[in-house]
Amino acid sequence: MIKKETGTQPGCGEKNDRCWWKEGVVYQIYPRSFADSNGDGIGDLRGIIGKLDYLKWLGVDIIWLNPVYESPNDDGGYDIADYRAILYNFGSMRDFDDLLEAVHARGIRLIMDLVVNHTSDEHPWFIESRKSTESPLRDYYIWRKPRPDGSLPNDWQSFFEGPAWELDDASGEYYLHLFSKKQPDLNWENESVREEVYDIMRFWLDRGIDGFRMDVINLISKKPGLPFSESGSGARIRGGEHFINGPKAVEYLKEMKQQVLNHYDVMSVGETPDVSAEIGLRYVGKPGGPLDMLFQFDHMDIDYGPDGYWDIGEWTPSQLFSIFADWQYAMEGKGWNSLYLNNHDQPRQVSRFGDDGHFRIPSARLLAIFLHTLKGTPYIYQGEEIGMANVRFEAVGDFRDVAIRNFWNRAIAEGMDPAEAMRRIHYRGRDNARTPMQWNSGRAAGFTEGTPWIACSGDYPSVNVELQCDDETSVLACYRRLLTLRKEYPVFAYGLFQEITGRKGGPIVYTRTLDDSELMVVLNWSGEEIPFPECAKLLLGGVQDRRFLVSSYAGSEPDGKRLRPWEAAVWHFSG
Ligand code: TEU
Ligand code: CA
């Protein structure tokens, strides 16, 4: 079992105390694409078990598993048909128990995805609910009659294109689905729905898991009356002002905490699109905020164009840094940050925020150094640690994601040039993150003996774990170093963040301070050589006891005169 550290008791976050989920680093596994143990081309639980020694070697403390539940897989498992069963492609409940035991045996914790804003339309609740307007489970979902003129109940939009309403022919009523039409939204107003959710949570917590990542958890409360959108509301999606951070979202989560989470030593992280730091504190501000941390989206929306998600906009490193810095200050002493630059929904970070061409290695290392030297819990998405980059499938049929397919169909129907639509998919598409994990240079990147469910990215012969694990200059070595340092120096987890420069272009410099222990981080977030920043020289000159910790150019300390392209460096000062 897991060794209990001091301060590790339920609710340790309540008083802003130290605790395991603040000190740990999370590794996110997208099971379908991680490791296939039986050659059917689909990653599975036994495959994960086979890679745990790698994760231990890397220094990971917590694993987050994307959904592994029974699902028709319309949306990569985010459409759940049975919350208490493992999808046969991934294995069995026996395999799950073995995985959990093997994880714990290595002193690692495991959290699971809790997807309860919606179910699959193949979940028995929905099958029952749609039988008739009189069904005892009718009210588990959000059903509405058409308006008198026969039109949709309101103008809300789905995140995956088109209206958020689907007509059910049998009853002539519409059901709400904020995601695909195979993902009907649950009605959280109904107390029985909430009880069912809490039971599901207890089922997994009693099996021994260590917490949940809660999918779009700030969407669970819809404004009563389901009003039409307000023009110019600024919400990321039409109608969003009525269902994102809705009136009872925090209240429901407080109930969940009281009834379930408080009774276990576990962590919770809410996925919350469209939260400002101010709203975020309602969820994680202590005392009282019901969740431990959030995935906020400010930095993920940084390169949206005027037409939103599928439009490509401009961004700069100083804007990105400002967003992170603002969140650092907003959470200080009040709540806890989670830190991420990519995940299973986002393009690969080295392609989006770094340089996946000539400077792939230093830029991937710079991004790692940046994220792991901020205050909060860092999340590594599988493959990030070796600098995996975006893919460029040419045929639309090679993509698997429902969001990509729906976008393509709409764009082509609306007359967009197919080359432009494809450019946007290459930039933004979620399948960038979902190609097989690159283990070695063998066929299918060592992911499977069979045919992978989605093709491998073409760069795997040169970008893979096997090539990097004994190479001190690799991206992987940098991650391993950062995770080691984090365990050695508490200032990584708990030090106060203070920016020195970085909001106006040029170098980025910040410090982290905990008692007499201090980190100084210097970043050149560009492909150009620049002078070494004067403010950093001053700080370096003023200390006696300093140690150079890590850099984006393996093992070599900056020369104090210039910063090379994508050069990032961290020093520790003490005394
Ligand atoms: O994502 C929610 C969400 O906000 C995404 O749809 C996001 O808008 C998009 O991917 C681009 O950022 C969560 C899951 O992470 C995602 O995989 C699911 O498809 C979605 O919820 C529905 O469950
Ligand atoms: Ca398999």
Image (cartoon, rainbow, N blue to C red):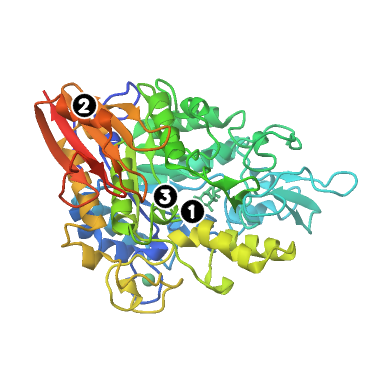
Q: Up-down: is 61 above or below 266?
A: below
Q: In the visual, does 174 lie left or right of 431?
A: right
Secondary structure of the residue carrying numbered label 3? loop
Rendered location of residue 571, percent (x, y) = 18, 36
Q: How many angstroms separate mark 1 from mark 3 (CA)? A: 15 Å
Residue under pointer 2: 538
Rendered location of residue 548, percent (x, y) = 14, 39
Comparing 368 with 176, the one in front is 368
Q: Is mark 1 within 8 Å of ligand 1?
A: yes
Q: Which residue is drawn at 31% across and 30% down?
A: 10
Mark 1: few, some, or many residues within 10 Å (few <14, many ≥20)? some
Q: Which residue is drawn at 30% across and 31% down?
A: 510
Kind of residue at badge 1: Asp
Comparing 112 with 564, the one in front is 564
Q: How many angstroms separate mark 2 from mark 3 (CA)? A: 29 Å
- Is residue 73 at least partly visible in the picture? yes
Residue under pointer 1: 345
Kind of residue at badge 2: Leu
- Is residue 86 at least partly visible in the picture? no
Residue under pointer 3: 353
Q: Which residue is drawn at 39% across and 48% down?
A: 112
Comparing 224 with 169, the one in front is 224
User: Closer to the N terminus: mark 1 or mark 3?
Assistant: 1
Point out the frontmost of discs 2 and 1.
Answer: 2
